[in-house]
Image (cartoon, rainbow, N blue to C red):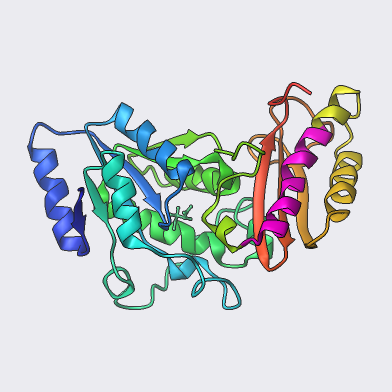
Amino acid sequence: MPTLFKKIREVKNYITSLKCDGNKSIGFVPTMGYLHEGHRRLIRESKLQNDITIVSIYVNPLQFGPAEDFERYPRDLERDLSVCAEEGVDAVFAPTDEEMYPEKPLVRIEIEGLTDIMEGAFRPGHFSGVCTVVLKLFNIIRPDRAYFGEKDYQQLKVVQRLVKDLSIPVEIVPVPTVRDEDGLALSSRNTYLSPEERQSALALYMSFLLAEKLIRSGNRDPEQLVGAIRDFISRHEHVKRIDYVEIRDEELRPVKEVKEGDRILLAVWVGDTRLIDNWRVGDAQV
Ligand code: PAF
């Protein structure tokens, strides 16, 4: 079993002892728990590249809006600890809200042109909450490397920019999205889906394959491609609303003509579940 820390002071002491003990390299996997194969992939990557792997499990209230699923978000610390044990994680940091935020944090972090688009536009304050917790966790854990899934591509770009602009001494390691066999991107929120909704949710992945086909047949117009993706997804049962579909370059700048390496990003409500996914253009042989 990994060592479980609930207190900041205790995990900091543990980190200090690791640094004193031959300056061991620390890989860090920040999570909100309810670990799945995608998290396992992050952990495995960290274990390959570092002496010690630490996972944090904390459902961060700052990154949820008032009408969002903070209360409903799935939690199961015992199960998560078993997953971490199976993967050979050295330590888990699972603080309470009181431990992380004894006072309401007043810091607000914004990154112009990055935290105000797509997820940021539909979830005001979300990325400020993500940046606050990630920065705080980095200050507590002082990792050499931190692992973020490409499933949350915008979050990955936000964290990379945060680290760059503030010269935070950590290497951000992106890890590709893990999908079920039928293409659904793994997410703790998939547990909200009924079997019928899960079937409709496959439309997200299938829309990427459709876009790949259109691009290969010569259509490079982002507006037309976005239109085709929207039409395709909205024809599926249980799809309640599409928040956005966008095609941007790998740094999330708008594009005039779609090329290999650009990203298709979307957020779609299937029933009462909001799913996000993204796709790197050129990744499928269709
Ligand atoms: O991606 C997540 O699970 C969360 O946004 C993170 C990075 C753990 C911050 O709460």
Q: Quadrant of the C terminus?
A: top right
Please report the residue visible at 83 percent of the width from the left and 50 percent of the height from the top: 233
Query: Horizontal placement of 79 versus 36: left or right?
Result: left
Note whether residue 204 is visible: yes
Query: Horizontal placement of 42 versus 11: left or right?
Result: right
Please report the residue visible at 80 percent of the width from the left and 30 percent of the height from the top: 212
Where residue 213 sits: x, y (%)?
A: 85, 28
Where residue 36 sits: x, y (%)?
A: 46, 47
Question: Where 102 sits versus 56, above or below?
Answer: below
Residue 90 in magenta? no
Where residue 263 sits: x, y (%)?
A: 70, 37
Question: Where 219 sits versus 5, above or below?
Answer: above
Question: Where 158 sits versus 239, above or below?
Answer: above
Where residue 68 sits: x, y (%)?
A: 59, 72
Note whether residue 117 is visible: no
Please report the residue visible at 36 percent of the width from the left and 45 percent of the height from the top: 29
Q: Quadrant of residue 256?
A: top right
Nearer to the camera, 128 or 57: 57
Magenta stretch: give its range: 193-211
Query: Horizontal placement of 95 versus 160: left or right?
Result: left
Nearer to the camera, 205 or 174: 205
Residue 199 in magenta? yes
